[in-house]
Image: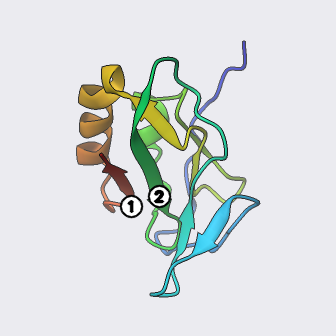
Amino acid sequence: MVRHTARRATAHHSLSYPGPHAAHTSAGRNVHTAEHPATEGEPTMRITADTDRCLGAGQCVLSAPDLFDQSDEGTVVVLAGTAAEDDRQRLEETVALCPSQAIAVEG
């Protein structure tokens, strides 16, 4: 079992770390998604995170460590690009806890 710990960002500005799974949106922002779902069951929701908007508070890692981690720079890393319906409530709470509203769940 891999244990993830939250790291505190040292600054309150957005650090750009696109990483291997980042895609640039038409607005020029870095959006991080994972290649493979980490949850069992039928994936029904897509999880994305805007790394340009992320402040590195780590609330996502604390509330859903199996779905999120932080880069060495402190910005959000999506470990699971999709999630099953069973995770909906926990994901909605995680989105609400994010102080920069950098996480989005669709579906």
Residue 71 spot, x, y in % from top left:
67, 52
Q: Residue at x 65, y 65 (%)?
A: 22
Which of the pair 24/57 is nearer the observer?
24
Q: Quadrant of the N terminus?
A: top right
Element assignment for label 1: loop
Q: Residues within 10 Å of mark 2 (few under 14, many from 20)?
A: many
- Which image quadrant is residue 93 in? top left
Looking at the image, which residue sits at the far top?
Answer: 1
* Mark 1 residue type: Ala
Residue 58 versus residue 64 in the image, above or below: below
* Mark 2 residue type: Ala
Residue where numbered disc 2 is placed: 49
Q: How many tags in the picture? A: 2
Which of the pair 14/11 is nearer the observer?
14
Q: Earlier in the sequence, mark 2 or mark 1?
A: 2
70 relative to 40 in the view: left or right: right
Residue where numbered disc 1 is placed: 102
Residue 84 versus residue 24 in the image, above or below: above
Q: Residue at x 56, y 57 (%)?
A: 9
Could you tell me if the residues under marks 2 and 1 are in contact, i.e. CB atoms within 8 Å? Answer: yes
